[in-house]
Amino acid sequence: MTTPAGAGPGRPFTGRRAPNTGPRESRDQTRTKGFEVASNSEILALSHALTIARTPGVPARPNPRVGAVVLDDVGAVVGVGYHRGAGSAHAEVDALVSAGDRARGATVVVSLEPCNHTGRTPPCAQALIDAGVRRVVFAQGDPNPVAAGGAATLAAAGIEVEGGVLADEAALINEEWTFAMQERRPFVTWKLATTLDGRSAAADGTSQWITGPAARADVHRLRARCDAVLVGTGTIAADDPRLTVRDPDDVPLARDEQPLRVVMGTRDLDSQAKVFDDTADTTVLATHDPKHALSTLFTRHRQHVWLEGGPTLAAAFLRDGLVDAVVAYVAPAFLGAGRHAVADLGVTSIDEIRRFELVEATRVGGDVRLILRRETAMTRGAG
């Protein structure tokens, strides 16, 4: 089926909607972004669906976090659902099961456009058609070109469709997944720990520990949100890290909760290195090309890479414009000599400086955590 204009991946559905059929609530129509129309009860229900999607414990990888709510003729909630992970029912189907027979003639609101393809599960668009729903309201258009098009399929079946309602809020829930689907590569977060003078190790190579225990525990909390941890072969040879996510008692999480450990480079490694133990899966990418590494990881369904390599690997990603966010732990200390946090970037003039937008500065124990994002055109023009 041809997708209507304006309904492509990542964009709200704006095609012609089916005519009103059957009873419906008297509603105060609310317009957002100039063209989407949704009732107050639908917007409230969609807010609830977003809350469900962002609830801790809702799986975040490899599929997006999605919530759905079913409303009857008068706007009362008769079913709720969420996606429980790859291979399980999607949020819409889960909500339809919750609603039972009350789904027929109902309105389904969902945080992501219903999928239109058969993967591990059948297409949600067809499930909604088969359930006899009257209307579907969704927030974010599906940015995955493989799964997009559900809105058009629903409209062609005579179901009213509204898209793009609270779309920005929905996109934030799955920010890295959305980026990966649009850019066809994983989102990259570079983590570093440094002194105030930009050193990541002392002159003798020692680096444990620049930051305190609170910062190191925070690293594990954020590392757990990613689905791949990437270092270079040099880091494995020098530090022999395990690269697992550990709990506050320093116990590794279960293997199926661990991100994929990725080692990038062509150096021969000791088969007994800790990174090859059985606490998590590990893959070696025999390349020095960041673009090739990310392309390979994307084909393996990895959407968020936590980059923890040394200064050489970090510089390679920065030079290629492949660092999307930075989490920097800064210790109130000086070394004066030793390894820099990042290697030569080829910058010869201040005009070539690599700037990022400061999003957050937070004290973590005795250190400061800075969160930065890739600088936008707006922030470049601000100063």
Image (spheres, rainbow, N blue to C red):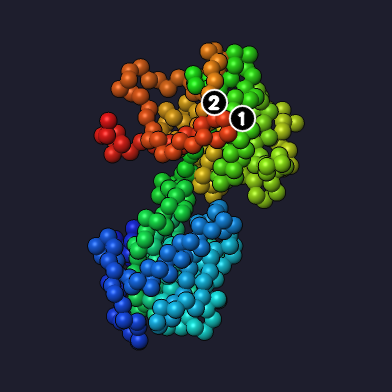
Residue 26: image location, x then y, percent: 31, 81
Could you say whether the residue bearing mark 2 is in a helix, strand or loop? loop
Residue at the far left: name it.
34
Q: What residue type is labelled 1?
A: Gly
Q: In this view, does 51 lie above or below 230?
A: below
Which residue is drawn at the image coordinates 65% and 49% (left, top)?
Answer: 257
Q: Locate residue 223: give its quadrant.
A: top right
The residue positioned 67% from the left and 51% from the top of the image is 256
Q: Is residue 268 left or right of residue 71?
A: right
Q: Looking at the image, is mark 2 or mark 1 earlier in the sequence?
A: 1
Per the image, label 1 sits on a secondary structure element best described as: loop
User: 354 and 368: which one is in front?
Assistant: 368
Instruction: Between residue 12 and residue 27, name the one nearer to us.
Output: 27
Residue at image point 68% right, 28% down: 240
Q: In this view, does 82 lie above or below 330?
A: below
Percent position of residue 202, x then y: 59, 16
User: Taking the image as drawn, is residue 335 in sight?
Assistant: yes
Q: Which amino acid does label 2 sit on?
A: Ala
**Circle 2 sits on which residue?**
331
114 versus 250 height, above or below: below
Residue indicated by mark 1: 212
* Rendered residue at 47%/53% (across/down): 174
Q: Position of residue 78 (x, y in %)?
A: 49, 78
90, 59: nearer the viewer? 59
- CB under 8 Å between discs 2 and 1: yes
